[in-house]
Image (cartoon, coloured by chain):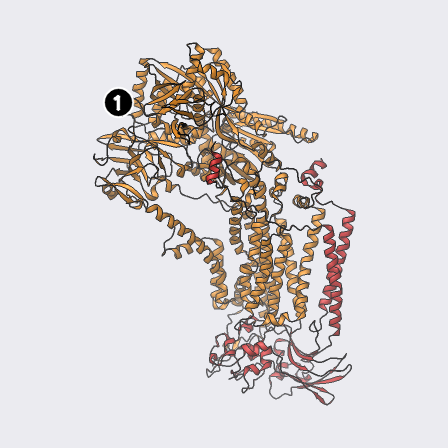
Chain colours: A red, B orange
Amino acid sequence: MDASTRTRSSSKKPKYSRFTQQELPAWKPILTPKWVITSFVTIAILFTPAGLLCLWASEHVVEIVDRYDDECLPGTFSANPESYIQSKNTNKTCVRTLKVPRKMIAPIFIYYQLDNFYQNHRRYVKSRSDKQLRDPDDADETDDCKPIDHTIGDAPIVPCGLVAWSLFNDTYKFFKGNKVIDIDKKGIAWESDKKYKFGSDVYPKNFQKGALIGGGELDESKPLSEQEDLIVWMKNSALPTFRKLYGKINTDLEANETITVVIQNNYNTYVFGGEKKVALSTANWIGGKNDFFGITFLTVGGVCFLVAINFIVLYVLKPRPLGDPTHLSWNRNQGAQ
Amino acid sequence: MLPNSSQVRGWIMTSNRPSLPTPGSTGSDLSSSTSSNNSDNNQIPNLHSLQNSSSQLSIKSNSWRASVNFGSKGVSVADSEGFSISRREINDDDARLVYVNDPLKTNETFEFCGNSIRTGKYSVFTFLPRNLFEQFHRVAYMYFLIIAILNQLPQLAVFGRGASILPLASVLFVTAVKDAYEDWRRHKADKIENNRLSSVLVNDRFQHKRSKDIQVGEIVKVSADETIPCDIVVLSTSDPTGVAYVQTINLDGESNLKTRYAKQETLSKVPEKDVISGLIKCEKPNRNIYGFQANMEVDGKRVSLGPSNIILRGCVIKNTDWVVGVVVYAGRETKAMLNNSGAPSKRSRLETHMNREIILLSFFLVTLCIIVSACAGFWLKRHQDELDIMPFYRRKDYSKEQVENYNYYGLGMEIFFSFLMSVIVFQIMIPISLYISMELVRVGQAYFMIRDDKMFDAASNTKFQCRALNINEDLGQIKYVFSDKTGTLTENKMEFQFASISGVDYSGEKIEFYGEQGAYNIQVDGQVWRPKMKVQVDSKLLKLSKTRNDTKSSKEIYDFFLALAACNTIVPIVVNTSNPNEKLIDYQGESPDEQALVYAAAAYGFMLIERTSGHIVIDIQGERQRFNVLGMHEFDSDRKRMSVILGYPDSTVKVFVKGADTTMFKVIDESLNLSVVKSTENHLHSYSSIGLRTLVVGMRALSIAEFDTWQTSYEIASTALMGRAGLLRKVAINIENNLSLLGASAIEDRLQKGVPEAIESLRKAGIKVWVLTGDKQETAISIGYSSKLLTSKMMQIIINNNSKMSCKKSLEDALITSRKLINVTRASEDDESSVALIIDGTSLVYILDSELEEQLFELASKCAVVLCCRVAPLQKAGIVALIKNRTDDMTLAIGDGANDVSMIQMADVGVGISGQEGRQAVMASDFAMGQFRFLVPLMLVHGHWNYQRMAYMILYNFYRNALFVFILFWYVLYTGFTLTTSITEWSSVLYSVIYTAIPTIVVGILDKDLSRKSLMTYPQLYGSGQRKESYNAKLFWVTMVDTLWQSVVVFFIPLLAFWESDIDSSSLGDLWTLAVVFIVNIHLAMDVIRWTWISHASIWGSIIATCICVIVIDAIPALPGYWAIFNLASSGLFWICLLGILIASMIPRFIVKMFMQHCKPCDRQIAREAEKFQNAMEITRNGEIEMNLPHR
């Protein structure tokens, strides 16, 4: 009939292409026992040494941590630490001695560590004005900073907000015997922050002039971009237990040396039950001292090794030829009857 | 279908021409009803009882009651509705009054709508409000909106303005652009349609007018091959007898010509000269394209109008020079526009189940929020005394004169705020974007289904159609297939096979006329005219038919073929061929059976060459003879026969009747020749037992007195205004009696290509195939055998009863037998022999909607095959409902005719065959295709793929969003329960928009778990969908446990690694962001089965895009995390962390997956392995299903 001619003239037949027929060339990986075992063994082989390497690296990091918030509290105030810390008249100086367990090679990083301080608390995180920090013309951009936005006289506080207000203000001095160890306070903040987030022409104004003092004060003659302690502090930490860089020591410390730390214990963590620690640490590629990775990697490697063995046993004891039709459900049922 | 309510032949008396009724005037009605009923083969035995059942059914379910009206063409129930309507006069209140050629008057009283159409939904001004209104009808969008609004409250502002509105805005924007584009296209089409010019009578002259300016009441003139601009009542045509041929392909897809008639009262008027005035009273606009009720007052006379007097918008005039008509319905009130509605929307099974899990997820969400708010409450309570000056809380505000609380509303309110805030933060626990992704994926899947060249039907040049876009995945879970027979399993291309004439069976050897010369032809003016279709003829009968002598048998053969050539409504149309000396006669008619009979008659030398209003011309063995058609009683489903009264050239008058054997033998005078009747009955039985459709032909000579009586009563009946159809039926019954039997014809409706193989495949796939047919039992069973539905090993249970009691008894007996047999089968381990149930419509009348239903269900579910014969359309739906309401199994109905509409709409998935019987079934269906055998690739291949893809995608989306929420949740526990997120708000917004959206959509559209070849070769693989292997509650919980583990790994590895370190919040947030995106994409990558370049691009592309986004976000100095990623990436710890997270989070999943793959491999897994390592299975074996090889 005329079907053929019609088809030829105006056929709606879909044009053949590998795409429309869903026949694009494809890689169809199937994980055969060989592959399964290989992958588990590979992970085991990679992770076990990696774990050991991490442990080794972590072992080479020398770290000295000293909690001083309780020790530096004079016994007479132990029942009432807040009055001690809030008073202007009490002696805040506190001397701690630390022993260097192993040789520490410069640079040695000095951190202060706070526990139970929620720098990621919603109220806290939002209470800052990045605009104001960057640009002197935006000094009035203090909407997010409430209640620490303006003085009672309605002048804007620079830098405003809880974050800046609660600036950490303990200070440390390190002595080797009677010799002062120099602390390098330069370059503790991110370059990017100094350049772009904190203006070099923004100067602190009306800072810590309120009824309640939250923490450290700022030198009003130095622009914010040079106030590295503030910049470090204002980089909100992710977790409620955190360290922040205080400075660097650029000389090596020998093993078994005793160093003295003179602490000005100003910062009030007693109000919320927080802890304060000072930490000295060297650093290598793994960062600070951290056994966690080594252990994790070793665990993963070990588990994979065990799994690989199990699979080998399984494949040997209960082999199943790939694509064996007898295992198809309809064949199985027939066999069972 | 209104059976001929319109043919008032008042002009038989008024006209001075010979009183010859127009044959076609009955023709159009007759043929449409025959055509629609030919699938039922005129076999519905007891209309009234069926109607009872259908009305009961309709009470039960209104939803598809309505659908029956929708597809009421020729449905027997609608037929009977038609009777009642025709008896009813049009009430003035319900009528529309159209003053012919007086649009002003017509339109002054009632505001009829003009002819401009608007399929576009919006205008420039209404677009925004209306589109937004429509979009917000979705629950998903409301959820987005409420969350966004909550976030705008200052106390709850978790995200910034921009970030909180972005997801909603982007979704709204994408949808709006899509809607606007679609609407723009509609507007464009409307504009073309509205500006089309047509000829309208203005001031007694035909002038060109734009289509949109046409008004009701105006007179329009349409020329050949033009499209009708609105619904018009024909006034006159170029044909002196007032016939017009129209093609309705745009309306119902039927390509053959239909005839429409002008009324005698108007056809002689020339609009430009004669004043035409009149009043048409017609029904209100409705969507029934096969019905029209009206009457027209013209020149003081009242004539009634029916469906054959109206031409609907969208039809094309053919073979007629011009048609003049008066506009009755215009614009959106035209029947074509009223029918212009989309397919009904269904919700897929998978989506229903998914919604159940979404409710679970919202419980999770609420639980998380309660935990957070309770903890926040405890924390505040414990630190109550310290809050005032706590450096990170500072409740007291000392900046004012008076010290007061700052932003603190009391413990209760703070807890409440924390709850709301946590809802905002954890909002994506409910994967709202999933709905949008699913829509995109379905569009993609539909794209591939439509473009599958293995579902393209070359014979009818039709592509697969995806009409419903939301149930693609249901195709992979079907358990029951309900199939129509005629036109679905068979081609519905009738071929005359055998004849039994006067008790002699002519089923001997066939001669095939394939040569050019062999076919019967006649010479007309030096040209050769041949019938278009060639028919195989019986050599003996051919010889006999050619010999003209006065022997009895020769006369009987003559009468038999004359009856075949004359007793029908076929219109011969002469078609030119490439050879100028050769013309083809194309027999146009709506009943394929009649076409086959006329072609057969032509092959034996009785060639119908002309049919005009009052006569037919038949070329009998080279000799032209003209017969007057004095009257015609069209087919109706009560009588199941039609008759024509022929006036011979020698002025004798004979009535020829043709009809179904059941009703024909009642009106045949058996006393005339009992042995002939007996042997014909035997022949009929043998014909139908090999699956042939049979018709019986009878005849009687009328005496003058008889003819006169008939003519009088015929005139009275056909001019009656009340109950015309009933009267006409009575007249017909009076004349159709005491017939002498001429013979019987057997027509083959051949099985479609590949049907037995397709049924075999479906059966192997664990799908039960039920055939529901209007045919009689013998035919149904024989088709059952030839389509391999029934096998000789099967035991048949036949239920064929006439009362409720006997039905009950046979059901009980059948149940006992089937139970026994199934036990035997089990013992003998032979799954080939099983039970087949054959039940007929009469029994179903007593069973459906009674307490017996339960027993039928029990019996049917034990049977491998169920064949229902002689069922009415509504019973088909009732049977589907029987299964659908009692089981959780998915049903699919496939059919091609209007009688399948109710069944198609009832079933979970409706498939229409776009075949010979018009487009009603297709219009009601969810998917439409050209051939039954495409069901196999549709379900076994595409259905399987779609189900696997969609199921995986849903689970994956749950996982993906929950993982992110869990990570946020863990972090909240370390922030004093204050809902801070270390992941930047932009990253959390972009997470489901950019970071992870595309791979899941790509995998949902493109991934294939198995190749087409495996799926076709092993239909059993389809079972995974039926068993819900890829999406179930267990998988959901396993996924959630895995999610929990992964979230713990992602969160706590960095937490422990960076505890007591100087890491800042943004850096840790970036680490978490990258880790979660890597993991989520690697997780997906582990489950991708086929890696095409697109999957590679999307998965690795997403990871790269995420990195780029994170870098870009951290390069904006205004954001708190400025430069964090660069500092982070320079530390070794970050990379170690990332590696550790990736491996540790994936290991449990990998172990479980590998273990299950080895020890409990699913069928799909084995088949996949076999596909790759062809050693074990002989996969190269050709699939049993006939496949069109892709041409390259």
User: Is the residue B616 above or below the residue A243 in the image?
Assistant: above
User: Is the residue A74 above or below the residue B852 in the image?
Assistant: below
Question: Is residue B93 visible to the viewer in this orientation of the structure?
Answer: no
Disc 1: CA contacts within 10 A as few (<14), some (14-19) or many (>=20): few
The image quarter in which residue A248 lies = bottom right
Tell me: A235 left or right of B123.
Answer: right
Give B405 or A113, whichever is nearer the viewer.
A113
- Residue B957 in percent (x, y) is at 57, 55
Give B688 or B757, whichever is nearer the viewer.
B757
Q: According to the image, label 1 marks what residue?
A: B17
Question: Is residue A48 visible to the viewer in this orientation of the structure?
Answer: yes
List the single residue furthest toward the bottom.
Answer: A178
Give A301 or B160, whichever is nearer the viewer.
A301
Q: Total marks drawn?
A: 1
List the single residue furthest toward the top.
Answer: B551
- Residue A309 in percent (x, y) is at 77, 54
Q: Residue at x 72, y 53 (%)?
A: A36
Quarter of the image with the N terminus of chain B is top left
User: Is the residue B831 above or below the residue A88 in the image?
Assistant: above
Label 1 marks which chain's residue? B
- Residue B293 in percent (x, y) is at 32, 33
Give B803 or A150, whichever is nearer the viewer.
A150
Amino acid under label 1?
Arg
- Residue B1137 in percent (x, y) is at 67, 66
Quarter of the image with the C terminus of chain B is top right
SS state under label 1: loop
Tell me: A103 left or right of B83.
Answer: right
